Image (cartoon, rainbow, N blue to C red):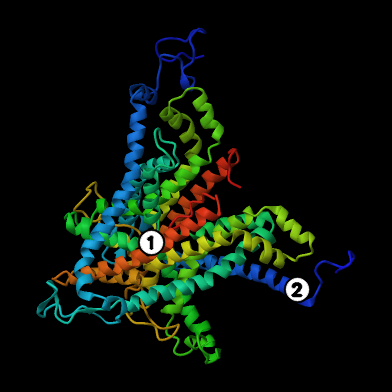
């Protein structure tokens, strides 16, 4: 046995923590000794402070947003929620005052096209993503052998972590042109001229627009919904399913009458969570939407969303010397924040009630 | 009334058809989920590889050409900042939420408010956080585009995630560990440090790695807080712009110069590899420890 430092340990010496001879302490142990007695209050204070910090950050964010948006709220009024014109006014023209707020002459902001674009793309994403995710989750839990289902499940979870700018890049360069060349013209030429489906007719564009944005968003929220659905299905106890099979039910009937009712509220929660992600997604949509502030005339029309407008206009808003353009973007951000916060808190509450999963299904992964 | 010999459910053609439709739907759905993912990864690789030069990693950006060393290092610096700021705050508030901090009450009013704040923040659109960082920190406090506002905004984004994964990891530590520590008369903080946190470390590490992947792949909030720099990152917290990997992807992808577009594709490949490495590392930590965990989630 090699002796360390000064005192060779005699058999009578009790070993210290970490197997070191007593009397010799590592730096952490020395630090712990200094801390002892002060450790409890230190933990208490640190945990208390750290749990207040997110609250402070949230309060700060909301305050800044509200203060910045206030002039715009006063001038734009209800028109902001219903109008579809988005005119910054002349940067070199006269400055006029409305309700005491200075803004360029001729400026008029109505965000309905942005709000509608946000809701439309998210709705398309949900309509595509939910049945596909639930089906994939069924395939993973009920149909495929474990050696295949496990790596595929991991791959789907990992997909959630692909940065949105990369999804946008692929959507703009690969998926969009592919759809515009091979899929959209076929669809547009074959759907009947009846309500709802009518929107699939007409000019198909170059691959940017409403439907492409919805598909790209669907791709981004599928991992969230599919992996939650898979975990939920795996939690359904086997006995009710086996009982249903003993009654002679087919797989499809077991799924329809046992598994789905068992996890319904969890699925609703996962769907709303995906919706929240889709509503706030910025970069990918900015790359594939066509960035036109207008309501898309059909499924292939160029449009934009609130988040995409903020990211593409904040730069140029600084050229408005009165600061009114920046204030208007704050108002748009406030609308978006309210929509997505309501959606997300709702989802968390539904999930928390439906399962004790404790799954950290976060905002982005 | 059916006799016992009758099948409970009749074998009709409709039921059989629905059965096969269901099976087909499940497999087709799985294909629809997996195929675009493979296509996406392959597409990004295919765009970058034909023009790939290793010097991209060792030279800095020059205008719309050159390399990405500044962006790679800048992204790493940003992630390190997020690890320090969001890591400490997130882990501590996770401990508090799990009710494991000495003196914290898991069902108290402070905890309820903290939980609500974290729920709200986790659903907050990142571009709105970026906007607030821009008007309040970059312009309002005259910090200009720089490291500090970028790190703060990214941290606010990922703190809810870290807090929640820390809470989950702590809750999964078998109750016997805590009870044993109590029975031995260990003070709460000591038990937390020596027993509970040690057992929950893999789960916490996974949360941190995933949070870093999220922060590293973020674009929208960085454009208006970090700015962009072709120089290597410095130690300056404010007044100095900093490069990061998502900027060239977003800025150059549809630029009319081939060299700029190549830079964009290269950045996409480097970023994807970086993020996937982090996620695989997180997976690996989970896989290694779940083999031993008693109270693992099923």
Query: Is residue B292 rendered to the left or right of residue A31?
Result: right
Q: Chain of mark 2?
A: B
Identify the residue at image location x=23%, y=59%.
Answer: A64
Identify the residue at image location x=56%, y=90%.
Answer: A190
Are the residues flagged by discs 1 and 2 in contact, CB closer than 8 Å? no
Point out the residue furthest to the bottom here.
Answer: A193
Is the residue marked by circle 1 packed among few (<14), some (14-19), or many (20+) residues within 10 Å? many
- Asked whether B146 or A232 is in front, the reply is A232
- Asked whether A207 or A116 is in front, the reply is A116
**Residue A26, position as x, y percentages in the image:** 39, 22
Q: Chain of mark 1?
A: A
Residue B69 against residue B15 in the figure, above or below: above
**Residue A113 visible in the current orientation:** yes
**Residue A215 visible in the current orientation:** no
Is the residue marked by circle 2 packed among few (<14), some (14-19), or many (20+) residues within 10 Å? some
- Asked whether A279 or B86 is in front, the reply is A279
Residue B189 against residue B58 in the figure, above or below: above
Disc 2 is placed on an element classified as: helix
Disc 1 is placed on an element classified as: helix
Label 2, on which residue?
B15
Residue B255 against residue A165 in the figure, above or below: below
Label 1, on which residue?
A341
**Residue A146, position as x, y percentages in the image:** 67, 54
**Residue B186, position as x, y percentages in the image:** 46, 24
């Amino acid at each position: 046995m090699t002796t360390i430092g000064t005192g060779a340990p005699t058999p009578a010496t009790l070993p210290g923590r970490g197997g070191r001879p007593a009397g010799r302490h590592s730096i952490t142990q020395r630090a712990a000794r200094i801390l002892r007695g002060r450790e409890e209050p230190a933990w208490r204070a640190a945990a208390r402070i750290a749990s207040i910090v997110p609250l402070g950050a949230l309060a700060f964010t909301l305050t800044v947003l509200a203060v910045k948006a206030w002039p715009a709220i006063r001038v734009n009024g209800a028109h902001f929620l219903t109008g579809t014109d988005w005119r910054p006014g002349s940067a070199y023209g006269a400055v006029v005052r409305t309700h005491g707020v200075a803004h360029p002459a001729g400026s008029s902001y109505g965000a309905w096209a942005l709000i509608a674009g946000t809701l439309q793309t998210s709705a398309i994403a949900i309509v595509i993503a939910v049945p596909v995710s639930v089906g994939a989750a069924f395939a993973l839990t009920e149909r495929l052998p474990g050696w295949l289902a496990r790596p595929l499940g991991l791959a789907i979870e990992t997909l959630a972590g692909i940065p949105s700018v990369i999804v946008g890049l692929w959507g703009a360069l690969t998926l969009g042109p592919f759809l515009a060349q091979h899929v959209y013209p076929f669809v547009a030429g074959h759907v009947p001229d009846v309500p709802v489906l009518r929107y699939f007719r007409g000019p198909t564009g170059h691959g940017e627009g409403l439907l492409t944005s919805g598909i790209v968003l669907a791709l981004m929220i599928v991992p969230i919904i599919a992996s939650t659905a898979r975990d939920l299905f795996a939690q359904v106890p086997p006995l009710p399913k086996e009982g249903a099979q003993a009654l002679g039910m087919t797989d499809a009937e077991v799924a329809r009458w046992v598994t789905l009712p068992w996890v319904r509220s969890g699925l609703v929660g996962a769907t709303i969570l995906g919706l929240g992600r889709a509503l706030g997604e910025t970069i990918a949509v900015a790359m594939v939407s066509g960035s036109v502030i207008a309501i898309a005339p059909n499924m292939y029309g160029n449009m934009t969303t609130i988040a995409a407008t903020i990211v593409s206009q904040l730069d140029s808003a600084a050229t408005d010397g009165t600061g009114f353009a920046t204030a208007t973007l704050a108002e748009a951000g406030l609308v978006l924040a309210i929509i997505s916060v309501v959606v997300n808190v709702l989802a968390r509450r539904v999930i928390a009630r439906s399962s004790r999963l404790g799954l950290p299904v976060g905002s982005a992964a | 009334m059916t006799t016992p010999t009758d099948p409970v459910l009749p074998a009709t053609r409709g039921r059989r058809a629905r059965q096969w439709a269901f099976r087909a739907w499940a497999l087709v759905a799985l294909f629809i989920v997996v195929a675009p993912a493979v296509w996406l990864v392959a597409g990004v690789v295919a765009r970058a590889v034909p023009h790939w030069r290793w010097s991209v990693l060792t030279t800095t950006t020059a205008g719309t050409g050159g390399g990405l060393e500044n962006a790679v290092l800048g992204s790493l610096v940003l992630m390190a900042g997020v690890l320090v700021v969001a890591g400490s705050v997130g882990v501590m508030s996770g401990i508090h939420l799990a009710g494991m901090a000495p003196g914290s009450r898991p069902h108290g009013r402070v905890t309820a408010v903290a939980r609500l704040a974290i729920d709200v923040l986790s659903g907050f659109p990142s571009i709105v956080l970026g906007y607030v960082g821009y008007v309040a920190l970059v312009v309002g406090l005259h910090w200009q585009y720089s490291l500090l506002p970028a790190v703060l905004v990214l941290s606010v984004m990922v703190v809810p995630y870290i807090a929640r994964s820390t809470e989950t990891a702590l809750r999964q530590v078998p109750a016997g560990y805590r009870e044993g520590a109590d029975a031995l008369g260990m003070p709460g903080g000591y038990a937390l440090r020596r027993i509970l946190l040690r057992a929950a470390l893999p789960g916490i590490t996974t949360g941190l790695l995933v949070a870093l992947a999220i922060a590293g792949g973020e674009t929208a909030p960085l454009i208006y807080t970090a700015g962009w720099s072709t120089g290597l990152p410095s130690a300056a917290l404010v007044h100095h712009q900093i490069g990061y990997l998502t900027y060239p992807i977003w800025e150059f992808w549809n630029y009319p110069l081939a060299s700029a577009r190549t830079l964009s594709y290269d950045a996409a490949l480097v970023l994807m590899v970086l993020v996937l490495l982090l996620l695989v590392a997180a997976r690996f930590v989970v896989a290694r420890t779940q083999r031993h965990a008693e109270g693992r989630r099923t």
